[in-house]
């Protein structure tokens, strides 16, 4: 027996090392898929929100949206949230701020915008939210580079043209300005997710933010009831409320948060750029909204700009 043979015989059989690259690829693929699910579902929520315009006051629609979402999430998340109650208490400040931007403000602004702008415009303006995410990153010390800066400026130019109805005049439609505020709120929420405690489970995080968001909405809901009165519960109002409560809130938020934990806000934002296309198609099929040449030009500017802006 040679020395090499004896060495092979003496060496213990060791298991093969796990393929870290393959694991990362699978996680990346799952993250992209989850971001796509959230994007498509949220595209439908803009159509549902636009369909409810004039029948359900915005604050009341958002309040019941989160009550429905709570009922949908609680059976899967209540036990985990109870186990992690001490962790939730320690991070209550962060959770409150995340709830304010991602639950209370963002959705209220979207429903308010749906009163006076089209679903297609809502989707196109929201597609520019990665521009705001990049600006927050720049303020945090991250260098953007010339190509990313040019892309973000191009996307911002497309948004200005869109809300200015084809011109750069400051005479913007109220609904488009509400959507700009919604995009700012959603971008802030997405950036905040980077600071989510790693040990806090996804279902527990969702349930906690839904509860906090609904509590912050409760005073505004009471005022809306007193001033505007309630709304009639019918098939036209119940269907969209169930959609935005179960799918756009519970399902989409879980998918989006998980996607960001797997691939980060920047890569998830790239998938999010598909939203204006999805919204325009759904708006045409379900609401009969048509997208003209000017809107298509703005869509091209926004999508091209954010695609450049996402590249490193």
Image: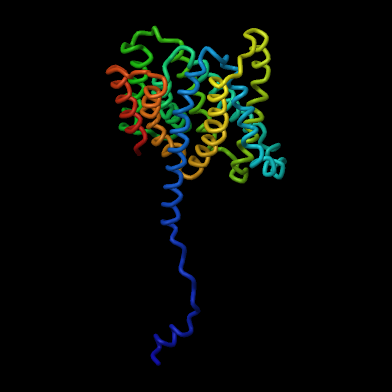
Q: Nearer the viewer, residue 208 or 184?
A: 208
Where is residue 202 shown, x and y percent of the image? 59, 41
Count every numbered label the image shows and give the total: 0
Q: Is residue 20 above or below residue 258?
A: below
Q: Residue furthest front?
A: 235
Specify the quadrant that holds the C terminus.
Answer: top left
Q: Is residue 295 above or below residue 145?
A: above
Specify the quadrant that holds the N terminus.
Answer: bottom left
Q: Is residue 172 left or right of residue 293?
A: right
Q: Is residue 185 above or below residue 229?
A: below
Color encoding of the figure: rainbow
Where is residue 41 shown, x and y percent of the image? 47, 32
Q: Residue at x 59, y 23 (%)?
A: 104
Q: Quadrant of residue 205?
A: top right
Where is residue 40 shown, x and y percent of the image? 44, 33
Q: Nearer the viewer, residue 52 or 122?
A: 52
Where is residue 132 shown, x and y percent of the image? 44, 26
Q: Is residue 60 above or below residue 200?
A: above
Q: Residue furthest bottom?
A: 1
Q: Residue at x 52, y 12 (%)?
A: 54
Q: Residue at x 39, y 23 (%)?
A: 124
Q: Residue at x 34, y 12 (%)?
A: 165
């Amino acid at each position: 027996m040679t020395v090499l043979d004896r060495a092979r015989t003496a060496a213990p059989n060791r298991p093969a090392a796990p393929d870290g690259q393959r694991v990362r690829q699978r996680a990346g693929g799952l993250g992209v898929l989850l971001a796509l699910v959230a994007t498509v579902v949220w595209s439908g929520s803009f159509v549902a929100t636009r369909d409810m315009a004039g029948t359900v006051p915005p604050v009341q629609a958002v309040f019941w949206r989160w009550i429905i979402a709570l009922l949908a999430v609680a059976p899967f998340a209540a036990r985990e949230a109870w186990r992690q109650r001490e962790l939730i208490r320690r991070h209550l400040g962060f959770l409150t701020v995340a709830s304010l931007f991602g639950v209370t403000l963002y959705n209220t602004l979207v429903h308010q915008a749906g009163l006076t702008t089209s679903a297609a415009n809502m989707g196109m303006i929201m597609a520019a939210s990665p521009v705001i995410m990049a600006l927050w990153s720049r303020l945090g010390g991250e260098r953007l580079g010339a190509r990313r800066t040019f892309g973000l400026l191009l996307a911002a130019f497309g948004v200005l043209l869109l809300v200015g109805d084809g011109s750069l005049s400051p005479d913007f439609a109220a609904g488009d300005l509400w959507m700009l505020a919604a995009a700012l709120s959603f971008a802030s929420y997405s950036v905040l997710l980077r600071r989510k405690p790693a040990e806090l489970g996804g279902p527990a995080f969702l349930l906690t933010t839904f509860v906090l968001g609904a509590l912050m909405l409760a005073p505004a809901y009471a005022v809306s009831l007193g001033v505007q009165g309630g709304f009639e519960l019918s098939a036209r109002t119940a269907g969209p409320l169930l959609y935005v409560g179960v799918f756009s809130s519970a399902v989409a938020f879980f998918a989006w948060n998980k996607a960001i934990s797997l691939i980060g806000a920047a890569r998830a934002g790239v998938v999010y750029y598909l939203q204006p296309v999805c919204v325009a198609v759904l708006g045409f099929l379900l609401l009969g909204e048509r997208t003209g040449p000017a809107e298509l030009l703005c869509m091209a500017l926004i999508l091209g700009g954010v695609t450049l802006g996402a590249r490193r």
